[in-house]
Amino acid sequence: MGKQPEQELEDNLVKQLVALGHRFVAINDEAALLANLKSQLEKHNNTTLSANEFEKVVNHLNKGNVFERAKVLRDKMQFTKDNAETAYIEFINQEHWCKNEFQVTQQVSMEGPYKNRYDVTILINGLPLVQIELKRRGLELKEAFNQVNRYHRHSFGTSNGLFQFVQLFVISNGVNTKYYANNRFQSFKQTFYWSDHFNKNITQLEEFSKVFLEPCHVAKMITKYIVLNETEKILMILRPYQYYATEALIDRVKNSTKNGYIWHTTGSGKTLTSFKASQILMHLPQVHKVVFVVDRKDLDYQTTKEFNSFSKGSIDGTDDTHALVKQFSDSTKLIVTTIQKLNSAISKQRFLERMEKLQEKRIVFIFDECHRSQFGDTHTRIKSFFNNHQLFGFTGTPIFAENAVANEKGKRTTKELFDECLHKYVITDAIKDENVLKFSVEYVGRYREKEGSQTEIDIEVEDIDTQELLESPQRLGKIADYIIAQHPRKTHSKEFTAMFCVSSVDTLIKYYDIFKSKKDNGEHSLKIATIFSYGVNEDDKDATGFIPEFEFMAAEPQALYQLNTHSRDKLEAYIGDYNKLFNTKFSTKDSQSFYNYYNDIAKRVKERQIDVLLVVNMFLTGFDSKTLNTLYVDKNLKYHGLIQAFSRTNRILNEQKSQGNIVCFRNLKRATDDAIALFSNKDAKDIILMEPYEDYVTKFNQAFDALIKIAPTVNSVDDLASEVEELEFIKAFRELMRLKNVLSTFADFSFDQLAMTEQNFEDYKSKYLDLYDKVKNENAKEKVSILEDVDFELELIHRDEINVAYILQLLAKLKDSSPEEQTKQRKAIIDILSGEVQLRSKKELIEKFILENIPHIEDAEDIPQFFDDFWDAEKVKAFNALCAEENLMPEKLQEVIGNYLFTERKPLRDDVFEILQEKPKLLERKKIIERVLSKIINYVNTFIDGVDRSA
């Protein structure tokens, strides 16, 4: 059987949607779309609209971007009818989501810079709210995703911009089907499979459509489970496990008074789930208040900020217990607070008079990370104080009998505290769905110990786990050297950041001082920062799995009380180093300044301004940073403490971040295996942990074999006869890049072990980039290429250290070399220019500089100045040539380029139109503006981007 054609796939889907309850309507263009919108809005609102009245509606709809239109969709429109009466139009019924008008159409044409025809569109009350793009079986799903992005650029905003109302995209090749919210800034990584309640993915288009695109369900997803993120001004949609968890909580509150907990693995988006659940629960008539409880002030701050980003002003974060008690007493429906303040509110005498009035009210408590060690006593107090309470917990790592810690009340598990688990989404589910990354765990540290006077034997760390050895300056120094040497490899040349967790404050101080001394001696340039609050040395052998928490108090620096004087002085000195590095003014003198220091560190780690954050316990729970990919470990961890710490590294970001790197300087293998078995199952290691280095070598060599079947030699790439063959080459080499990206993070990596030489890889890479240039050439876009939809994943070959400054260093060496060596080095430089994305546009000019200038420069130290003069002259020449070729106004062109560099957003077509000396006719305008825009971008890429050598 041949591959199913795209048209057949599309026709079958339309038939299925009609059978599900969507009425088919033929719509070819925007005029038909508007006519249908009028009739559907009239039907939905049980009214009739005159042409004038409908024009008012269309003008009301044609405002703002995707985010603003999502708000318009959810609001009623008030307007004055022709007879002067006030009337309202509802665009979607959110309360009774099944009571909307559902239609399906196909092949709607819209024309912007290019004419696009969309595959299948679901209309609700006449507005296009779900867009489905299909590719035939066998094609990459990502091609459909890239096609949607092209429509964003070319036509969704055309004319009245009705396709800006799309809330959901569905992409499918028949075999694989995914959905995502209308947020053009997200990557393919932010697209999701739908699944059943037990996390079994529903990938086939027919089965997906049956459950997800059924009218009531898709309307429910749009009205209830899309979140408008106010901070980032984007739409977000819940993933299936978030949906099922929220539905389970709602059902529990509506139909019982039982408690329950949600087990969703760390990094799976519990805040979004808990927000949506809280938002829906607070609107239930039987619920008096919803109280969202977190355990620390930093999480109170972080969660309040996140909640308010989902719905601006929905949360009034409580700064003290008085404010909390006031919220309990007023009309606030949703409260975010800490366990500590909640405990004060129900136990301190001065608050009891007001709080006792609430004892019979139906109050739902939702606890974030419900296993926190301080929770036990407060849990008991809440249950005894509120007579009509309902308690729900969220956790990524529940407490079972195996990992429970005994106290005076015995071992208490999550089930004992919260009753049954209402929904489960464990780490193996998240990895399978590509919602979090696998871990690559490396164990570093076989030590040689003399036995008798002559023989040296290898002994594992586990076998010599003594305090004296673990804290010996020699060992700590070697570990620091290892981190300095391997950090660029682990973080892809500092594209990512790392944390280093150690066993105690005393050990941390030793490590920090070692790193600082080595930096002062010029041995590294890593930006090291630290924060700690506990001065108690933990006994690693008794690690319980709990990572101790700290607490910020309003008036006194309680977080620091346990530090001895020496530790406090050291921390103050380290904060002083931080202040010098970042021009800040933090200290330990009061808790607010220390808290601000904490938040500043969190921000700078996320923004990659800190290379290694040195910690004991802080930041090992509750801290999310997509840009952190490596954890160095020199402390004993187990069970939930281990999973929580490891999970700092496995947030999804892009293709380059292929795994979370864990580098253990202790033998945690058994502890890792035990933790994985407890929180998934005993056979889950293969799913959670990356394969051994040797397996990736084998995979790389197999991928190379596949590549040379398509293109046996580098030059044979030029002979590929069609775009279909070029596409096969692109996919084959991209797979090699992906595997090399993984291999390069291993300490053992070397091209010597691969079937392909490094030079051969670079040569093929150059041909790969030639194809990229061909596809991306704006001037050549007269027809749509099948290569347009391919993601070249250039981040896999981006290297910050290969820039103009680096090339100038090579040119200096070239100048001082012998003639034979010069020929070799010149070829090496040209190869680098061909193989680096950010330098390819500069290749021709740098070659010209080498040929025309290098021979006449006597002193290699003068090369940078000569290069700057040459570059400035060429830049002026190119600028004047651009103005002359396209008849542009020079001053206005400078202004457009300046705005482009400042905003980092491409110039608008209107801006380009304004700089043309002669305004083209309407029919020519689009083509000319596209050509000029392309030339401006090429000019900036060539002469400005990546040329600043001061950075």
Image: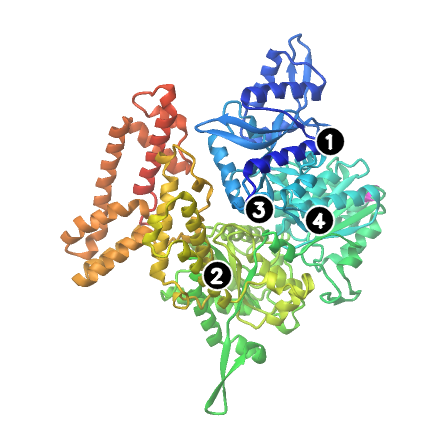
Q: Which of 21 and 39 is in front in this view?
A: 21
* Residue corresponding to mark 1: 98
Q: How crowded is mark 2: few (under 14 residues within 10 Å), some or many (20 or more)?
A: some
User: Between marks 1 and 3, how big is the CA–CA gap?
Assistant: 40 Å
* Residue corresponding to mark 3: 1
Q: Which of marks 2 and 3 is nearer the N terminus?
A: 3
Q: Does the magenta stretch include residue 229?
A: no
Mark 1 or 2: the one toward you: 1
From which residue to which does the magenta span run? 353-358
* Residue corresponding to mark 2: 573
Mark 3 or 4: the one toward you: 3
* Residue corresponding to mark 4: 293
Residue 321's spot in the image, x, y percent? 71, 46
Residue at the spot 47% in from the left edge and 70% down from the top edge:
479
Query: What type of secondary structure mainly makes up the magenta span?
Result: helix
Q: Which amino acid does label 1 sit on?
A: Cys
Q: Do the residues labelled 1 and 3 touch (CB within 8 Å)?
A: no
Q: Do the residues labelled 1 and 2 touch (CB within 8 Å)?
A: no
Q: Residue 417 is drawn in which quadrant?
A: bottom right
Q: Does the magenta stretch include residue 357?
A: yes
